[in-house]
């Protein structure tokens, strides 16, 4: 059977009865909504929570070094206090409902970072789906290099159109031990998890997705492409960067077993009914609205809608979705370098409209949706999409930090 990079691992769960306080949303969400994070802080204050153990990106420009030191100190304190329970080697089947979908099935598992690469032009077993901005790695690296435990928000997609792997586990879920079942905070929905013991049958099912004839039939060529990073690409790139640094200090034998070689993530079938792609919109602020929009009309951004807080403007360029986004992003970068202002990346039309409405110096840009069934074929043929092309669902549907894993000896 072909290697996919999938690994069973020892997963950590919190030693707490208040799971709602423990789990918090991915750090790269709600970066223009400080009220979200203030409300969350108020809810979990004084309780065991992953908010103590991660750095929300909204704070990257506010005492970041001090915050990173605090995160690493908190991780050590939680370990010393015995705040984690370690499961036997295996996986966790995750069943999530959200305000938008009734059910999404995932599998928390380890992936071998030797099988992943985000560099342009590389074609590893595990691939980035969007461009990686290397300057976004250092703040994450500062946390990871001194952290004993990782808490992932990375979601990795696989292409199982017959729905034979996780869906089968879901039907058998009563056979497995339930390890959590609770309502998520801040309107994130409900989540339950089942421990799946280590077994070759499950790994072999993923390996079968790389059958030579199947790959030729789906993609027109035999391309060993097992997993595509859907969410958390920069976090996984950070884990890869850290591993590349660590492995240089190890013997060949030590490299085989060092825990930092493996990254924890949640695997999700791209055909799962709970998976849908939403475009990530651009929120440009601190600009002359008229001048910015006039310049935008002169490029081919594909099919986009422009919001200025008073009205909307529809532009129908000829560029494909990926090429249109590249064109828009290049225009924004050029405009801001010459005129000042800033750009943020927003999930959800309602959130974007709320930010733009009532302002006199901001513009929102809405892109079309990406057809999720096109993802693997596109990445196989052309490589990664532009960064921030799509999001898997709305902001509140992002993965919550919940499971952890030791990454130090």
Image (tube, grey):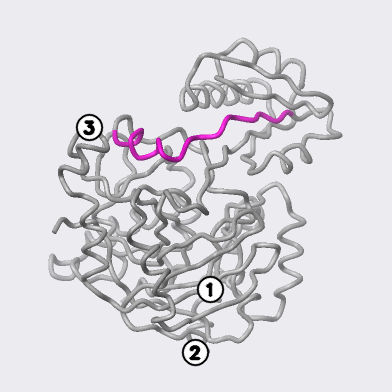
In which quadrant of the rendered view does residue 213 lie? top left
Residue that appears at 34% across and 36% down: 379
Image disc number at residue 82: 2
Foreground label between 2 and 1: 1
Q: Residues within 10 Å of mark 1 (few under 14, many from 20)?
A: some
Extreme top residue here? 298
Residue that appears at 63% across and 33% down: 282
Residue 397 point in image, percent of width and height: 59, 56
Q: Residues within 10 Å of mark 2 (few under 14, many from 20)?
A: few
From the image, tell me which residue sits under label 3: 220
Residue that appears at 42% across and 34% down: 385
Image disc number at residue 68: none
Magenta stretch: give its range: 363-380
Image disc number at residue 192: 1
Residue 314 point in image, percent of width and height: 68, 19
Instruction: Identify the secondary structure beneath mark 3.
Output: loop
Q: Give the vertical position of 409 relative to 114 (above or below).
A: below
């Amino acid at each position: 059977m072909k290697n996919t990079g999938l690994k069973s691992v020892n997963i950590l769960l919190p030693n707490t009865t208040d799971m709602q306080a423990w789990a918090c949303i991915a750090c790269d969400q709600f970066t223009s909504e400080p009220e979200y994070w203030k409300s969350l802080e108020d809810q979990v204050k004084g309780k065991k929570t992953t908010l103590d153990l991660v750095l929300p990106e909204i704070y990257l420009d506010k005492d970041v070094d001090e915050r990173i030191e605090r995160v690493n100190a908190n991780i050590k304190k939680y370990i010393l206090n015995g705040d984690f329970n370690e499961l036997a080697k295996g996986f966790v089947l995750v069943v999530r409902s959200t305000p938008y979908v009734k059910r999404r099935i995932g599998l928390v598992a380890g992936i071998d970072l030797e099988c992943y690469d985000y560099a342009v032009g590389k074609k590893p077993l595990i691939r980035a789906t969007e461009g990686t901005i290397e300057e976004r790695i250092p703040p994450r690296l500062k946390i990871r290099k001194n952290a004993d435990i990782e808490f992932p928000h990375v979601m990795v997609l696989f292409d199982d159109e017959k729905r034979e792997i996780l869906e089968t586990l879901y039907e058998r879920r009563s056979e497995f031990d339930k390890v959590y079942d609770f309502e998520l905070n801040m309107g994130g929905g409900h989540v339950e998890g089942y421990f799946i013991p280590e077994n070759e049958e499950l790994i072999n099912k993923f390996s079968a997705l790389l059958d030579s004839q199947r790959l030729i039939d789906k993609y027109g060529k035999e391309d060993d492409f097992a997993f595509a990073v859907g969410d958390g690409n920069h976090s996984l790139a950070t884990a890869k960067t850290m591993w590349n640094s660590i492995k240089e200090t190890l013997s060949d034998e030590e490299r085989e077993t060092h825990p930092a070689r493996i990254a924890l993530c949640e695997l999700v079938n791209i055909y799962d009914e709970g998976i849908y792609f939403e475009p990530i919109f651009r929120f440009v602020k601190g600009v002359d609205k008229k001048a910015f929009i006039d310049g935008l009309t002169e490029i081919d951004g594909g099919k986009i809608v422009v919001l200025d807080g008073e009205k909307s403007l529809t532009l129908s360029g000829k560029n494909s979705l990926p090429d249109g986004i590249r064109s828009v992003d290049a225009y924004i970068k050029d405009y801001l370098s010459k005129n000042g202002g800033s750009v943020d990346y927003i999930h959800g039309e309602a959130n974007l409209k709320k930010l733009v409405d009532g302002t006199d110096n901001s513009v929102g840009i809405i892109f079309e949706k990406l057809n999720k069934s096109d993802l693997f074929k596109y990445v196989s043929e052309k490589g990664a999409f532009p960064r921030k092309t799509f999001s898997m669902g709305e902001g509140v549907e992002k993965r919550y930090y919940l499971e952890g894993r030791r990454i130090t000896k």
